[in-house]
Amino acid sequence: MDCKRELRRRMVDRLRQLSPAEKQAYDRQIAAYLYRWRQWQEAKVVAITIAKETEVDTVPIIERAWQEGKTVGVPKCNPMTKTMTFRQIASFAQLEKAYAGLLEPIEEQTTALGRDEFDLIIVPGVCFTKTGYRIGYGGGYYDRYLQGITATTAALAYSFQVVEDIPVEDHDVPVEFMITDQGVIHCEP
């Protein structure tokens, strides 16, 4: 556990060192690879988070999804049960600052989307292995949500976030793909 915490801390420090110009360039490259990727093009219903400032910017990706007629689901966390549900948003005005400062859907203005409705789930994380295992933010929300999921799972990551090895626990669920500034990685366990 301490090893995960240390890796998370070091990677978040590295992410904070990106200059705004570097970050924008990487974000554009990642988005370009994502839009050309067959699984994105074929997906009708996409689950995605509203990124924190150190993560790949998802706002333009969500806007692109809407332009392409996709349904977009954003997570709503329940810190008491450490679970989350996804709710459909059609506008950024349907978001409010919530748990841990994250932007989450306003329940009264959005409808729930079931786990089986998604074609593609974009999973956040701090660092990843080529086999798709990840270190997230320590809540375990996604590992619980992804158990037995049938949708394609992918992460958006800067190439330096892909590391050789991370400690893996029994409950960890790897993603199938990573879209980086250097291209799409098909994760092979």
Image (cartoon, grey):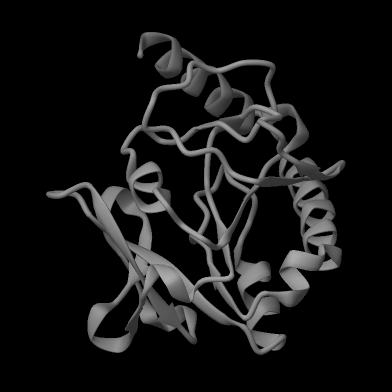
Q: Where is residue 158 in the image (x, y as percent from the top left)?
A: 72, 38
Q: Which residue is drawn at 64% across and 50% down?
A: 56
Above or below, comparing residue 42 to residue 168 in the picture:
below
Above or below, comparing residue 106 to residue 147 in the picture:
below
The N terminus lies in quadrant: top left
Viewer-side residue, 30 vs 116: 116
Q: Where is residue 39 in the image (x, y as percent from the top left)?
A: 74, 65
Q: Position of residue 160 (x, y in %)?
A: 74, 28
Q: Residue at x 46, y 57 (%)?
A: 149
Q: In this view, does 84 lie to the left or right of 182?
A: left
Q: Residue at x 76, y 51 (%)?
A: 24
The C terminus lies in quadrant: top right
Q: Residue at x 44, y 10 (%)?
A: 3
**Residue 71 quadrant:** bottom right
Q: In this view, does 72 lie to the left or right of 96?
A: right
Q: Where is residue 138 in the image (x, y as percent from the top left)?
A: 35, 32
Above or below, comparing residue 186 to residue 14 in the picture:
below
